[in-house]
Image (spheres, coloured by chain):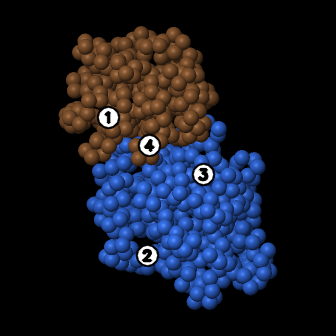
Chain colours: A blue, B brown
Amino acid sequence: MQNYNFPDENGHFGPYGGTFVAETLIEALDELKVMYEQFKDDKDFLNEFHHDLKHFVGRPSPIYFAERLTKKIGGAQIYFKREDLNHTGAHKVNNTVGQALLAKKMGKPRVIAETGAGQHGVATATIAARLGLDCVVYMGSEDVKRQSPNVYRMKLLGAEVVPVESGSKTLKDALNEALRDWVTNVSNTFYIIGTVAGPHPYPMMVRDFNSVVGKESIVQMDELVGKQPDAVIACVGGGSNAMGIFYPYIPYENTRLIGVEAAGHGIETGKHAAPLTANSPVGVLHGNRTYMMQNDEGQIIETHSVSAGLDYPGVGPEHAWLKDTKRAEYVAINDEEALAAFHNLCRTEGIIPALETSHAIAYAEKLARDLSKDKTILVNLSGRGDKDINTVAGIAGIKI
Amino acid sequence: MSRIRKTFDTLKISNQKALIPFVTAGDPSPEMTIKILHQLVTSGADMIELGIPFSDPMADGPIIQRASERALAKNVGIRKTLEIAKEFRKQNQVTPLILMGYANPIEAIGIDEFLKLCKSSDIDGVITVDYPPEESKAYVEKLKQNDIDAIFLLAPTTEKKRIEQIIKQASGFLYYVSLKGVTGAQNIDIEQVKNRVGEIKSLTDLPIGVGFGVRDPETAKNVAKFSDAIVIGSRIIQEIEASDESNMLENINKIIRSIKQVI
Ligand SMILES: Cc1ncc(COP(=O)(O)O)c(C=O)c1O
């Protein structure tokens, strides 16, 4: 794929993506498109963006050779791109720094966000505090319960956290509610979407802001290993950490790109969050067309994953396109496998990974086992697991 | 001429405006919806908007969201909605029926299947909330081939050039969203709506309905002075929520009559 040039000007990745919203949002999206086009190659804007990534976020994040894990598995060499070391603890902040800067340029004093695990909400609240913007975060009431440390973090940072009681009370409903807020307060509000979903230009813009991860990796792998990895692995909820590392690697045809979805209790049980792996029907939700978990009458069905950040029935439209064109592969890891990888990494490498990230690690272990020692795997270590310790303790029957 | 346009023309002769109530199919139950639809007509509805329940109604406020949730709990989806319409049509072949829904249920059963069901239920128009014109050209073409009006929303923020484009694809009437917000909101500014509707009228002969923020006879009366139709949804659904089956039809009757009288 040397000449990969997506999306087209209307935000389509082949048959996916697009702008499927009520007329009430069209003007706001048009405004955003124009502003993003204006700033995305603007020198001053990019300088400010990279200045904040360096001095506020702490980029570049290192690439780390997981020596003990590699030895333990006994196959391919495993490297981590350490997004967990970013300020706020995940890749999510790269995108929020970009979008908040854009909000500032557009003169919007108020930002809103949806959040599942709370990482995107925390990142948004953080950057809002840094730039002096009002911040409201919508979070499904189920997730508010699952991720209470992050709820408190957002409040400490001055954000208002609104629990969403509609529908399944998780990430997709938080996204609905944020869209409703945006329609209502469109003149003074910027909606910072946290993943490569939503209507055009969000999937493209969020990918672009996060692609700093892949761009750094290409340089760092060259310096550190002297070659590019044979496989790049990332977990996929909406797909922003995966697109961030995949996108710059698309022209590197010898590098396999592998997205890891959440198999929850198992694909065959229907209780999962893996629309690509399960070959779910294509549908329209949250402004774009993509693979979508739904019943035969188009009602979105409830998903399940132990990790709140992967608990989403759809997936970014660009992943749908990369699957169809076979440039990327998609697999799924269930709750149990992810938890095992979580515990293993804590003890083998001294890194507590996010439960989302643990899905990518679990698959990396599987793949490394099947590959010879001269092969290298790069895993996007998308976030740290401090936020998940209550969940993990709860599963072990421990109260902390 | 479509049944929708005919209704507007007839009302015009007697200097009346169309009252278009909205209810969600299956709320509170499929049987009750059929009774409600007939009651709406008896009380003065000139056309009816029937909502297709959807799990993720992103343009709707909490009241219509709850209506969708109640309907889904009774297993009413897109197919059952069209069955309800068909049942209604057995006794009423004159009142225009307009479906309002989201794209995903329509795509899930397939556009051709959807149109076939619409034909067999004698549907007059469809509003597909999240299909803006640029994403729905082929769909709108098919609606027209089947003599079903494609009704589009116009927002307070829709620019003139875009209004002109939408007018080219629209038929039946244009639905002007009276405020920046979701259905059932309360901050409608009559003067602003009046100016916008005037602007749109200068661009088209299509009738213009106003909805999203109309909740009481007073507002309806004022908006009817410069528009061709009033759409009222959340206010009726509130009656459905607050009533039990014994007084539901009477409560709906009261609210519809109070509005029909003044427009
Ligand atoms: C650490 C981490 N990784 C991954 C994800 C999943 O999101 P995405 O697929 O957009 O990267 C989340 C979401 O909250 C997260 O917090």
Q: Amino acid at mark 4?
A: Lys
Marks 3, 2 in one chain: yes
Distance Cα–Cα, label 3 vs label 2: 32 Å
Circle 3: residue type: Tyr
Is residue B103 depicted above or below A43 in this figure?
above
Q: Which element is circle 3 on?
A: strand
Q: Quadrant of residue A260?
A: bottom right
Q: CA distance from mark 1 to mark 2?
A: 44 Å
Mark 3, chain letter?
A: A
Residue at (37%, 75%) from the top-left corner? A46
Q: Chain of mark 1?
A: B
- What's the chain of the residue with tag 2? A
Q: Is disc 1 on the same chain as disc 4?
A: yes
Residue A196 makes an appearance in the image:
yes
Identity of the residue drawn at 72% across and 47% down:
A270
Q: Classify A121 as above or below A85.
A: above
Discs 3, 2 touching: Cβ within 8 Å: no
Q: Which residue is mark 1?
A: B176
Name the residue beneath numbered marker 4. B137
For marks 3 and 2 on the same chain, the one whose residue lies earlier in the sequence: 2
Q: Which residue is mark 2?
A: A53
Secondary structure at numbered mark 2 = helix
Give coordinates of residue B151: x percent, y percent: 39, 33
User: Which of marks 1 and 4 precedes in the sequence?
Assistant: 4
Q: Amino acid at mark 1?
A: Tyr
Q: Indicate if the residue with disc 4 has its beta carbon within 8 Å of ligand 1.
A: no
Q: Is residue A93 above or below residue A394?
A: below
| Image x and y of residue A189, in percent | 34, 53
Instruction: For label 4, count other residues whose C-alpha is less than 10 Å away and answer few (under 14), some (14-19) or many (20+).
Output: few
Q: Callout 2 environment at 10 Å: few (<14), some (14 to 19), or many (20+)?
A: many
